[in-house]
Image (cartoon, rainbow, N blue to C red):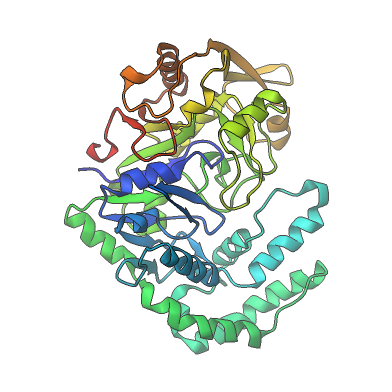
Amino acid sequence: MANVAVIGAQWGDEGKGKVVDWLASRADIVVRFQGGHNAGHTLVVGNETYKLSLLPSGLVRGKIGIIGNGVVVDPEALLSEIERVRGQGIDVTPASLRIAENATLILPMHPALDRAREVARGERRIGTTGRGIGPAYEDKAARRAIRVADLAEPQTLADKLDELLLHHNTLLQGLGATVFSKEAVLGLLTRLAPQILPFAEPVWERLDEARRAGRRILFEGAQAVMLDVDHGTYPFVTSSNTVGATAAAGAGIGPAAVGFVLGIAKAYSTRVGAGPFPTELPDATGQLLGDRGNEFGTVTGRRRRCGWFDAVLVRQAVKVGGINGLALTKLDVLDGLPELKICTGYRIRGAHYRHLPAAPGAQAAAEPEYEVVEGWTGSTRGARSWAQLPAQAVKYVRRIEELVEAPVTLLSTSPERDDTILMRDPFEG
């Protein structure tokens, strides 16, 4: 019996929420392993819609949820989210949610610095959510971060805040932003500590015990491979590693325990915010895809940019992300289009490429080379077997498999949980 890690294979917003929810119903533990509350997973369960940012999706299914050490945690945002889902009938307690004691905290100065930097960038802004994710990861790497366990040690908090505020207030003052007092931040953390600490533990011990007992673990990623801080369209990326290998480091478990890596990709492409997007359609077709797909970011609320399926980027994500199989979502959005296009390569300054180079100038100059395929007239919406799909829709999926060099193991045909075609069970390895 394999564990499963779910990651995005494009630029995020691929519909991971539904797939994670579908898998979580059959898992014992669900672990968030990177990112922060800049992520957003939307789960539709019956007549109820849950929008989660920090909480692992398995909580909706009554499973144990773990926030791993690779996540940066805004304690105020977390407590607010807990209260919101409690209002929807989900009982989140220390018995159902555990937080890694060595997870880094997002403090008030982090989003303030995030926003001030974006303002200073002007037209060169990178589209950050302004929630302090990047600055928190910076503090973690610089070894000055305040972590969950520090909340139990008042003197440690006070000492660490001296160094932290010296750094951040200097930057904020230079950017013309408001600085923070030690008394205010320390007072906030002191008030929050009794609410956060009951959830804290060395989660690696729990995961090791679960692994030894043969329990199913689902690792839930945020964002996607093309937003990975190393492998994505840098600098228009997130501040963490989003590839499958991060599930181990971000949860505190050995790499062999991660198991099957399932990559989520839409049957077309979308992107929120700034950054290169070779197959973008700034025309009526792009508008149509956005309208049909209800393409608005769960966290940002921004309209997503839409375009044709980019097999070059997804193949790249498969290779560097360690993806064993794809879950293809939103196939129904393409219903009725007379023809479809799939990007199979790029032209960059006269040269042909079968990958996206790392240099920003080359990324911005990439022009897609398309393969045109026939669309279909029937409907795929709600299909739960291959036999219910139009023949051309099946051909489209099979062509994607060939181009990205990975099997489509799961196909989603609507936001409803059961409108899913399963070709291979990821938990079976």
The percent position of residue 264, horizontal first and vertical second, equals 44, 37
The percent position of residue 295, horizontal first and vertical second, equals 59, 39
Quarter holding the N terminus is: top left
The percent position of residue 346, horizontal first and vertical second, equals 64, 21
| 11 left or right of 211 in image | right
Q: Quadrant of residue 281?
A: top right
| 165 left or right of 248 in image | right
The percent position of residue 304, horizontal first and vertical second, equals 64, 39
Q: Quadrant of residue 161?
A: bottom right
Q: Is residue 422 above or below residue 400?
A: below
State the residue at coordinates (79%, 70%). 177
Outermost residue on the front side: it is 47
Outermost residue on the left side: it is 213
Q: Is residue 267 above or below residue 57?
A: above
| 293 left or right of 170 in image | left
Q: Is residue 55 visible?
A: yes
Is 419 in front, or is 326? Answer: 419
State the residue at coordinates (75%, 74%). 170
State the residue at coordinates (61%, 43%). 296
Is 105 in front, or is 92? Answer: 92
